[in-house]
Amino acid sequence: MKSKIRFFSALFTTLRPLRETIILFFLVNAAFAQDMDFARKAINDLCAPELYGRGYVNNGDEAAAHYLRNQLEKMGVTPFDFNFYQDFKMNVNTFPEAMEVDVDGKKLQPGIDFIVSPDAPSVSGEYELIYLDKSVIGNPNKMDEFEKTDKKGKAVLIDSTGFNKVQKEYFLTAEKKPV
């Protein structure tokens, strides 16, 4: 009888780290499930129509900032300098009024047919277009020719249809240069 008790005692002692790991696993999963519920609610709240996409038109960014501040306060987080906000300046474009872009007589719809860079200046007028598409990106000779082209007073139209990952990355990481 003593050998059986020793065996179970030894087995229990040997499996103790495993037992603790299993208990820890269940505790972490329970905590994670609660965090997931909170995360889903926060995402739904931040994506609500009342926050206007957290954008600058209709002060959606401010509404989102207030929401985040309130959540931090509920969690008991202490702000630095008695303020949860960090002021910074950022140039952005908003288009609260009508905007019109025509290319070769075809009227384009913003957000569908084209996207304006957030730091692009306001412009009005007619411009000669320089076309940039997948036949240029990735072709070193054509890319050199494009980069040497005088772009002053012209508009660059980038057709990203069919771009591969490397070609898309070129525009995401390219340094913006004023023309």
Image (cartoon, rainbow, N blue to C red):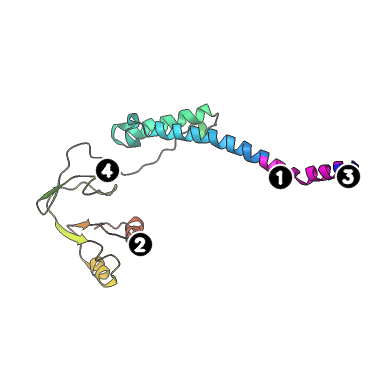
Q: Please tell me whether residue 151 is drawn above or below residue 78 in the rendered image.
A: below
Marks 3 and 1, Cα distance to the nearest angstrom?
Answer: 23 Å
Q: Are marks 3 and 4 in contact (CB under 8 Å)?
A: no
Q: Main secondary structure of the magenta part?
A: helix
Q: Which of marks 4 and 1 is nearer the N terminus?
A: 1
Find the magenta span and give its range: 5-22
Marks 1 and 2, Cα distance to the nearest angstrom?
Answer: 46 Å
Residue 169 in percent (x, y) is at 35, 58
Residue 35 in percent (x, y) is at 53, 35
Query: SS at mark 1?
Result: helix
Residue 41 in percent (x, y) is at 45, 31
Residue holding disc 2: 166
Circle number at residue 3:
3
Q: Earlier in the sequence, mark 3 or mark 1?
A: 3
User: Where, by quadrant of the figure, is residue 40 drawn?
Assistant: top left
Residue holding disc 4: 93
Q: Nearer the viewer, residue 169 or 82?
A: 169
Query: SS at mark 2?
Result: helix
Q: Earlier in the sequence, mark 3 or mark 2?
A: 3
